[in-house]
Structures are given as structure tokens and as C-alpha cells.
Image (tube, grey):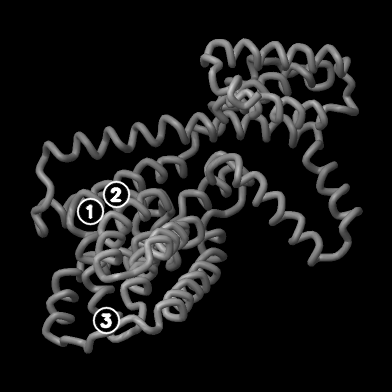
Amino acid sequence: MDAALRRLSPLSSAIGSLAVLAALLAVMGWLPGKSVIIFVVIVAGMLALRQPVVLILAVIAAYAHVFFTPKTNSSVEFLIQDIWFVVNREVLLSIPMFIVAGAIMTRGAIARRLIDVMVELTAPIPGGLGVAAVLACGIFAAISGSSIVTMLAIGAIMYPAMIQAGYNKPFALGIIMSAGTLGIMIPPSIPLILFGVMTEVSITDLFKAGIGPGFLLVAVFAIYSYAVNRRMATRAWSFSALGTAFRRGIWALLLPVILLGGIYSGYFSPTEAAAVSVLYAVIVETFIHRELKLKDYGAVLFETVQLLGTLLPLLAFAASLNTILDYEGIAESWVKFATGALDNKFLMMLGINLLLLVVGCLMDAGSA
């Protein structure tokens, strides 16, 4: 069965998805009390047909607007209106700017010089390269706001270095992939910005809430690296090498201080912080490090547009669906059901995390 699904062409898959959707609507009889069940079954059917997440969200959002027409006078036309309402927000400008800043720093020297500082700083610690990878991921996440950019920037340099130093391959991959996800928690985090847009929560408050768990994860990953590799050879600090690394990496170390200090002190909004990050990266890489030429920025913009072409449609359709479900009180009904069925705080948190685990196995963080 799975092999047959893999052989389906995109057109056949799309037609099959629409057929499944039509059959589901006919069988369910447009019963209002079963709206949530319909949503779940549609998602399961389209996932089985290996449809892109953006198509799944688009179909469900369109269906939701049509489904609730009798009560809300809504229609598919309002789907476009809801999408425009979401994307026409100033805070969304921060997402492409943080991605551009991360791409510039990855192609330039900031990531490499940051890693040099961390490697020299952790040289006397057993498992020091693993600890250096964790620290570098944490700081770079505070610069770029993106887990993907962080893993690419740090992993491309640290993975070969760790293998050459004799680290176990699964450990080297695992520590870089795990520490790369620090960009989800450590501000300025793009997933936190998306969450704030979707739930209308203060993004600055989300950044303040994320920094504690982010630092805790840095500590846990660093301790794990030390514990697993405590028999690895170490070397004493070379103060001349350490001083050289700090001198060369000072511009990389200053940026998270400027960004987070500006956001928490109220001088920057998240969008303004993103603009500062781009300007800082361009000035440092072009005029101070002199690593990037004008022609390199074309590739940077191309990479950014590729990523945004996936991310922003997901956000738009998800927000449109969220709007209609919120208006109809479906989300509130689920909350009441969950709080009534799970009156224990521990069980509630366990249930939420299990749900996030299942969703995270099916799609990326932005889609979830």
C-alpha cells in the first residue's frame, strides 16, 4: 500500500485528496456537531496521500469557511480577507529580516569566528568541542532566530572538526541537531514570533519567557557532552590563542547583546531588532570582515525567498483557519473539554507535550 502511494503522481494525489474530501463531506452529512471529526479525518486522509502541509491547510481552511456559512455569513471569499489580515502585520517583517541576517552571517565570517571563540574557551573541558558546539548554537540562535540557519552555520564547521578530533559520529550529529533547535526557544526566535502572531500574545513577553528555558537547555546539552566524552583528551588554555579568538570574534559576540538588550530594554521592537540585525551583519561582513561581495547578496536573497515561499503561505492559511475556528468557539470547546477531562496540571502538560510530539513527527515547527 505504501509503495503504491509513493508511485502516485502529484496530480493523481491531488485528485485523490479531493475525492476523499468530497466523500467525507457526503458521509458526514455536514453535521455541525461533527465538524471537528471532519477536520481530523480530512487531515489524516491527505497525510496518507502525502500532500504538502500547505495544501492540507488551504483545503481545510476553505472548507471551514464554507461549512460555517449558515451561521456566520462567511464564505470562501473571506478566506482571502482573513489571509490578508494576518500577513498585513508589521511584526511579520521581522521573519524575512532575521532569515537574511542569518544567511549573511553563515556565508560570511561571523559564524566561523564565533565558533573559534567557543572552541578556545572550552579547550580544557573534556568533551570541549561538543560543549563549544552547544554554546555556539545558543549564541548563533540569539543572532539569527532560526534553528535551520543555526544548524547549517554551526554544523558545517563543527561536525567535520568533531569527527577529525575522534568524536563518535552519532554523538556529533546528535549534539549539533539537538543544540540547533535552541533557536526555537532562545530569542529572537522565529517560531515564537509565529506563535505570537497566531495567538495574539505579546512577542516581547514570549521572548522573556523563552530565555530561561533556552539557557537551561544549553546547560543540559553542555553537561551531557561533558559526561559522555569525559575521557576525551583536553588541552590547556593558550591565552594568546584565546585573546586572538576574542579579538577576531568580538563583532559576533556583540550582536546578541545589542539585540536582546535592545528588545528587553524597550529600545527595539522585534521588527526593529531584525532590521538592526541585518544592518549589523551587512556592515560587519562587508566593511569590517570583508568576507562578502555585492554578488554574494543575490544568493542570500534567493535562499531567503525559497524559505519564505514555504513558511508564509503556511502561516497565512493556518491563521485563516484559526480565525474561523475561534469565531465559532471550536477552540474554546476543546479547551473546556480538555480542562474538564484533565483536572490535574501534570496530566494536562503531559497531554499537551504528547500532542506536540505527535504533530512534530508529521511536520516542521513552523507548520505545527
Q: State the mark number for residue 122.
A: none
Question: Are dots 2 and 3 in contact, CB under 8 Å?
Answer: no
Q: Secondary structure at mark 2?
A: helix
| Residue occupied by mark 3 | 123
| Residue occupied by mark 2 | 101
Q: Percent from the top left, x then y, of residue 359?
A: 64, 44
| Numbered disc in front, either 3 or 1 | 3
Q: Secondary structure at mark 3?
A: loop
Q: Nearer the viewer, residue 265 or 122?
A: 122
The answer for how far apart the CA atoms under marks 2 and 3 are is 29 Å
Question: Are dots 2 and 1 in contact, CB under 8 Å?
Answer: yes
Quarter assignment of residue 48:
top right
Q: Is residue 54 left or right of residue 73?
A: left
Instruction: Kindly identify the residue that appears in the image at 56 percent across and 44 percent down.
Output: 197
| Residue occupied by mark 1 | 281
Q: Nearer the viewer, residue 258 or 312?
A: 312
Q: Is residue 319 above or below residue 49?
A: below
**Amino acid tagged 2:** Ala
